[in-house]
Image (spheres, rainbow, N blue to C red):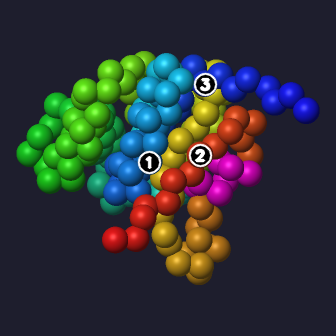
Amino acid sequence: MILPKIEIKKILYATDLSDSARHAFAYAVSLANLYGAGITILHVLSEIPGFETKIMGHIGAEQWRQLQERREAEARATLIGKKREDIEVHEVLEAFSRFENQDVVVDEILVRKGDPAEEILKQAEKRNCDLIVMGRHGHGIIEEAVTGSTARKVVRRSKKPVLVIHLPEE
C-alpha cells in the first residue's frame, strides 16, 4: 500500500484567545514550520440569536452598534498586537512572541462575527486551507450537552482535517 503524500500549505488557526487556544497555537506554528505553510488566524465574535434585539431594546440601536464596533476593534487589536494594557492581551502577545525566532508566515488575521463553528468551516473552505488547528476547553458534560462544543461541531462537519488540542493538565 502506498500512502499519499501529505502537503500542508495553508493552516487555519481558530482562536478564542483562551489558554487552550494559545496552547494550540504552538501546534499550528510547529506544523507551519515543518511543512512551510502559512497560517490564517481567525477569531469569531460569537453572536447569540435574539440577544441583539433584547439588548437594543434596553440601550438603543446606536449604543449597541458602538458597543459592537468597539468589541470588534478590541478583538482585532488583541490579535494584531496593538493593545498592550490588558493582562489577557499581554498573555496572548507573549504566546505569539515565543515563536518569533521560527519565521512563521501569518497570511491573514481575521475577526468575524457569527456562530464560531459555522465561521471556522466557512473560512477554511473560502481560503482553501489544508488543516484547521484549534484548542478545546475542558467543559463539563452538562454544559457541553446543552451548548455543544465548537470543536466537536467543526470536527463533525469539516471536509478538511482538524487538529484539536487539549490544554494539558498542570
Front-lying residue, 8 or 133: 8
Q: Position of residue 145 (x, y in %)?
A: 64, 74
In this view, which residue lies farthest toward the left? 85
| Residue shown at 65% from the left, 57% from the top | 152
Mark 1–mark 3 Cα distance, whole angstroms, equals: 17 Å
Front-lying residue, 97 or 34: 34
Main SS, magenta residues: helix
Front-lying residue, 119 or 138: 138
Q: Quick check: can you spot residue 21?
A: yes
Marked residue nearer the N-terminal end (2 or 1): 1
- Element at label 3: loop
- Element at label 2: strand
| Residue shown at 15% from the left, 37% from the top | 83
Location of mark 3 (residue): 8
Marked residue nearer the N-terminal end (3 or 2): 3
Mark 2–mark 1 Cα distance, whole angstroms, equals: 9 Å
Location of mark 1 (residue): 24
> For the residue marked with disc 1, what is the amino acid?
Ala
> For the residue marked with disc 2, what is the amino acid?
Leu
- Element at label 1: helix
Stretch in magenta: 150-156
Location of mark 2 (residue): 163
